Amino acid sequence: MTLTPKRAQDSVIQMTELVLPNDTNTFGNLMGGRLMYWMDIAAALATMKHCSAPVVTASVDNISFETPIRLGNVVHIEAKVSRAFSTSMEVHLRVWGEDPVQQYRYKSNEAFMTFVALDPNGKSRQVPQIIPDTEEEKLLYEGAMRRRQLRLILSGKMKPQDAEELRALFI
């Protein structure tokens, strides 16, 4: 089955949340788990938009919390499919905090997640390929194969010697 490729930009999801007291830790900062929950939702929406099918989270890459988001601030999450493989899709996420009183926006973190599309029987199904348009989309697209191979090695699903893209960086 051949699926029509789609532009990366067509998968963009932008989510906005307000940090309320129930979302914070004892320091008045947004809890990391709550942010990861919101990021998972945004990434799922981006991948469903891309493949027009239900999806499940397959992996979450390292999430580094650069700048805490405070109680009363606004969280902006942008999710976009950076590359599609056979049945899986890598999603690039960016998170910003915004102080609505002081009116400034700051980067909080960035991450990659991988999702798999499912058919009506809960089995993985093919997804459309991605067409990167911008320079940034092209860089993310090109790096996705290396990130994928690293994920597969770390999960024990690929032997390091079989990671052609990664080997090319070191040989």
Image: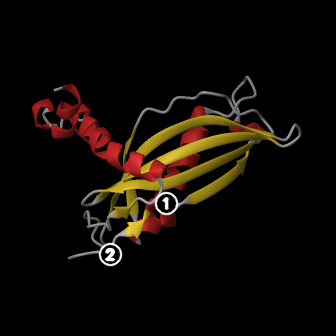
Vertical position of residue 25 compared to residue 57: above or below = above
Q: Where on the picture, by quarter, is residue 156?
A: top left
What residue did someone put label 1 on?
46
- 30 vs 108, nearest the viewer: 108
Q: Nearer the viewer, mark 1 or mark 2?
A: 2
In the image, 80: left or right of 159? right
User: Looking at the figure, which quarter contains the N terminus?
Assistant: bottom left
In percent of width and height, residue 89 lies at 35, 55
Residue 77 visible in this rendered orientation of the protein: yes
In percent of width and height, residue 110 lies at 53, 38
Identify which amino acid the numbered label 1 is placed on.
Ala
CA gap between label 1 and label 2 equals 17 Å
Q: Residue at x 54, y 41 (%)?
A: 36
What residue did someone put label 2 on?
4
Vertical position of residue 7 compared to residue 153: above or below = below
In the image, 152: left or right of 11? left
Identify which amino acid the numbered label 2 is placed on.
Thr
The colour scheme is secondary structure
Find numbered disc 1 in the image and state the secondary structure of the residue it sits on.
helix
Looking at the image, tell me whether mark 1 or mark 2 is earlier in sequence order: 2
Q: Residue at x 28, y 37 (%)?
A: 151
Find numbered disc 2 in the image and state the secondary structure of the residue it sits on.
loop
Query: What mark, if any, has residue 54 been given in the picture?
Result: none
